Amino acid sequence: MLPFSAASERNKAPILAVLREVFAQTRTVLEIGSGTGQHATYFAENLPHLVWQPSDRPGSVQWLEQSLASGRRGNVASPVTLDVNDHPWGVQADGLFSANTFHIMSWQEVEQFFVGAGEALQRPGTLCVYGPFRYDGAYTSESNARFDRSLRAQDPQMGIRDFEAVNVFAKAQGLNLAADYPMPANNQILVWHAGSAKRYPSRPA
């Protein structure tokens, strides 16, 4: 049986509502950590103006390829192997997207994600990252605090990341915060732009 993510099914529609706006002028999106491929299939179907490039770590691409095979649309490219630690990534796009990856990466891998993103993102370009974050060291909900404790109990290198620290990595690559969208289930979508100063409605201070 192919892997299936219930979370991806729950969050795909709210994420799409944001991507319709921030990727409106985008031609190609590289997804880092495509997992089951559910997001790739759904977003490509609903954003037919762009090409969606799925990717995942070595050892996971075979599962991803099988997941995509049955419902592959013409604007979904064949998945590629991508390890955030290996630079350059070997693929470029004017849009980058990643969902629920930062809290399962090590902190070093989060930093390397931004190094790779800075190289892979064409100018002008847009980076969107979905997932839970802390602000000023505080969780946005008690459920996120419990989730963070469970992650760190599994592996001390995992955990919910601080927005301010992540944004330092983004700035170092010339990426400017354009928006911070509150999402259902205490998640966020962070949007950075490269090569432009465009901004969208953002999270209230």
Image (spheres, helix red, strand yellow):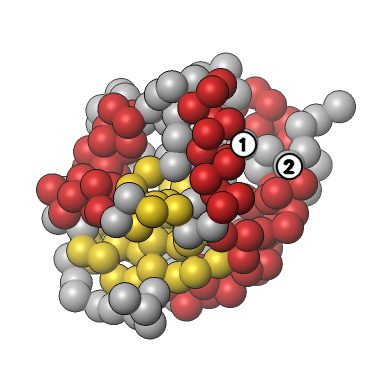
**Res 3 quadrant in image:** top right
Vertical relation: 190 (above or below) 115: below
Quarter of the rendering occupied by the N terminus: top right
Amino acid beneath label 2: Ser
Residue tagged 1: 35
Position of residue 111 measured from the top left corner of the image (x, y, whole percent)? 26, 36
Identify the secondary structure beneath mark 1. loop
Locate residue 110 relative to residue 115 in the image: left or right. right
Choose between 141 and 22: the one closer to the eye: 141
Position of residue 170 measured from the top left corner of the image (x, y, whole percent)? 22, 51
Along the polypeptide, which appears first: circle 2 or circle 1? 2
Choose between 75 and 44: the one closer to the eye: 44
Q: Which mark is nearer the camera, 2 or 1?
A: 2
> Residue at left 28%, top 48%?
166
Position of residue 185 measured from the top left corner of the image (x, y, whole percent)? 63, 60
> Residue at left 48%, top 59%?
140
**Res 127 quadrant in image:** bottom left
Vertical relation: 127 (above or below) 152: below
Amino acid beneath label 1: Gly
**Res 66 quadrant in image:** top right
Identify the secondary structure beneath mark 2. loop
Position of residue 84 measured from the top left corner of the image (x, y, whole percent)? 36, 30
Number of marks in picture: 2
Residue tagged 2: 5
Choose between 63 and 162: the one closer to the eye: 162
Quarter of the rendering occupied by the C terminus: bottom left
- Classify mark 1: residues with Cα within 10 Å, few (<14), some (14-19) or many (20+): many
Vertical relation: 158 (above or below) 13: above
**What is the spatial separation of the Cα atoms under label 2 and label 1, in whole angstroms?**
9 Å
Locate residue 6 relative to residue 136 in the image: left or right. right
Outermost residue, bottom direction?
201
